[in-house]
Amino acid sequence: MNYALITGGSRGIGRAVCIELAAKGYPVIINYASNEAAALETKQMIEEKGGAAELLPFNVSDSVAVDKAIEEWSEKHPDDYIRVLVNNAGIRQDALLVFMQDAQWNEVLDISLNGFFYVTRRVLKTMLMKRSGCIINMVSLSGLKGLPGQTNYSAAKAAVIGATKALAQEVAPRKVTVNAVAPGFVTTDMTKGLDEEALKKTVPLGRFGKPEEVAALVGFLASDAAAYITGEVISINGGLY
């Protein structure tokens, strides 16, 4: 059976993606770092709609933990493999660069950039052997245009955009697609500290996006209808550039 693994899948956009892919028939693996209660809630929401889901806790920035968790999952599922990987895990540690601490820089890059590397490297091997796979990286408007106070986050997401384009060319001969989705302002826990009233005035459509709207795009990219799309960065931002 073909599974979908969503990192940072317990809340926000990750939760919406889990629900969307489960609705499309994928058994979903919900990864989370620490919030088990939220992950269990996501699992319950999927199962109430008739979908299948399981939890797989690990810290994406810990290469040993990533390898161990996915290896153990593979041993329990000898006839299954992860066909869809959504690298969604990420954190914000906003600060002006002149005041930014080492930890604020390192933690943001560790989760968004190193997390992409550790998880993708591990899951990709089976995709290449099966000659079928879909990798979707959650990036950001911040990685495309840069946002003040987010030099770390912008750097991490811009790096993942570059990696997306390079990896797409590496694995295309084996029928694996690699794309990135770049949301603008979306109503989630990640944007709670932002001034929504002021920021939505900068968005041509005049509002923040919904996690479900981002998830719908991910669902399309994971479908057979998107099999000829690879190496792309698709913005979903209400017209804000």
Image (spheres, rainbow, N blue to C red):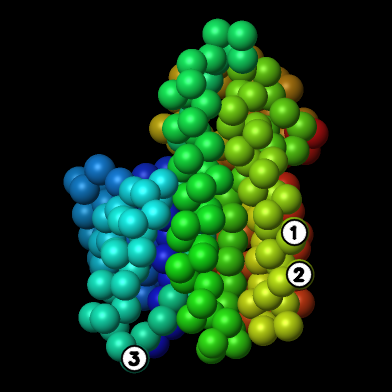
Q: Amino acid at mark 3?
A: Asp
C-alpha gap between disc 3 and disc 2: 28 Å
Q: Is residue 219 visible?
A: yes
Callout 3 secondary element: loop
Q: Nearer the viewer, residue 100 or 40?
A: 100
Contact, CB < 8 Å: mark 2 with mark 1?
A: yes
| Image mark for residue 28 | none
| Residue located at (69% from left, 24% from top) | 147
Does 54 sit above or below residue 224? above
Spot occupied by residue 224 in the image (x, y as percentages of width and height): 64, 81
Q: Give the residue number, with chain letter if any, for mark 3.
A: 79
Q: Give the residue number, with chain letter if any, for mark 2.
A: 169
Contact, CB < 8 Å: mark 3 with mark 2?
A: no
Does 236 sit above or below residue 136? above
| Numbered disc in front, either 3 or 2 | 2
| Residue located at (48% from left, 81% from top) | 126
Quadrant location of the C terminus in the rendered image: top right
Spot occupied by residue 49 in the image (x, y as percentages of width and height): 31, 68
Callout 1 secondary element: helix
Give residue 240's quadrant in the image: top right
Q: Give the residue number, with chain letter if any, for mark 1.
A: 165
Spot occupied by residue 113 in the image (x, y as percentages of width and height): 55, 45
Does 31 sit above or below residue 191? below
Spot occupied by residue 191 in the image (x, y as percentages of width and height): 50, 28
Quadrant location of the N terminus in the rendered image: bottom left
